[in-house]
Image: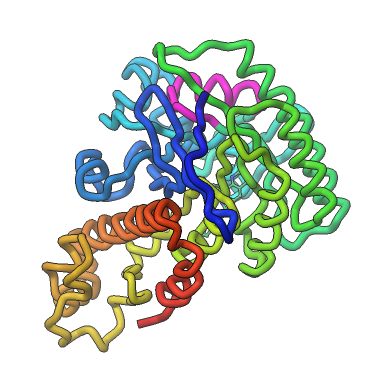
Amino acid sequence: MLFELHKEDQSTKARKGILKTDHGNIETPIFMPVGTLGTVKAVKPEDLRDKIHAQIILGNAYHLYLRPGCDIIEEAGGLHRFMQWDGPILTDSGGYQIYSLSDNRELKEKGAHFKSHLDGSKHLFTPENVVEIQRVLGSDIMMLLDECPPYPCSYEYAKESMELTHRWAERGRKAFLDTESKYGHRQYQFGIIQGGTYEDLRKESTQFMTEQDFEGLAIGGLSVGEPAELMYEMADLNTDLMPAGKPRYLMGVGTPANLLHCVALGIDMFDCVMPTRNARNGQIFTRHGIINIRNAKWKNHHKVFDKEFPSDVSQKYTMSYLHHLFRNSELLGLELTSIHNLTFYLWLMEQMRKRIKDGTFSDWYAGMAEQVDQKI
Ligand SMILES: O=c1[nH]cnc2c(CCNCC3CCCCC3)c3[nH]c(NCc4cccs4)nc3cc12
């Protein structure tokens, strides 16, 4: 069985569990660093394991399919070997990138036609071939091809889109059950709940995806520009209806404050580009709030930003130095802030796991969410 539930908080829906894969076990709730092109940008796999204590990372089927291509990955013996990461990997189907990256795309019953954002070449992702792509990548957990509707969208659009995703889900599950893993380790497949921000559609989609008997379920269609309160409301509605014994993955979420509130709503798994993407713009997440290191006020600030925090960036390099690195677009700046932000996200998840275990989560999380959200 993929998922074991260990402890549930008494006064919130927070829960602690273990995801068991052939590449190792993952303690939940967990944040999954995004490794788009077979690398978590500017971070070596050994730092991911030993400094950041990442337990599972994300790979991206869209990018890897386009470059280096499935044949290279297959000859390398799969993505784990290719990128020298021997821990668990979750890959997305590439569907979301088609919407967010390639401006010329066309959704048809058969699948998603798109033009490569690299060279304009034409491609088609279908519920079946994204299973094959992820078989070749060798991910421990693979995602379905789905459609993520924009926010806001009409009820009719959300309904049409959800029903397409449901038809694709049936085809994707069949393709998964009809094929084998290529490298000898077990692979799992997650369903993706859609329905926009419409309660009745969300309920229908949860019911439908639960019946397909996936090993885990993702909540899609959120973190696409809707207000945080609406995201929480939809996540709350979904976790009320999702089976307790299956892992729950909220896609594309989020800020440290989002993570705290969504764990309290019963979410187990998260991914977001923010810790790495925002790091590259000089945004540093800390226990006491968010620092924009490019701000002139740090030019002459010869102190480190958090001596007690377990990250050598926060204990060793002064803010004046980090400010200097960013003002001069020095590569070291990107590396230091990427490593720090991921360390912070994984540290925050570890604090949540500890507090769910010792029963102090419910009195702590809302105050912590306010604290980490402050602008320093
Ligand atoms: O319904 C969805 N279906 C499928 N994927 C979704 C994603 C992509 C999740 N991360 C993929 C990663 C795979 C590896 C490479 C990188 C992406 C979402 N991301 C967001 N918000 C993103 C964002 C939130 C804040 C800033 S961006 N909402 C999402 C909704 C869906």
Whether residue 313 sits left or right of residue 79 in the image: it is: left
Q: Residue at x 74, y 25 (%)?
A: 170
Whether residue 267 sits left or right of residue 312 in the image: it is: right
Residue 367, percent from left and from top: 46, 75
Whether residue 84 sits left or right of residue 217 in the image: it is: left
Figure colour scheme: rainbow
Q: Residue at x 41, y 33 (%)?
A: 89
Q: Which residues, given as a range, are shown in magenta? A: 126-142
Residue 204, percent from left and from top: 82, 43
Whether residue 217 sits left or right of residue 53 in the image: it is: right
Residue 63, percent from left and from top: 46, 37
Residue 228 sits in quarter = bottom right
Q: Residue at x 57, y 33 (%)?
A: 143
Residue 130 sits in quarter = top right
Q: Nearer the viewer, residue 238 or 93?
A: 238
Residue 25 sits in quarter = top left
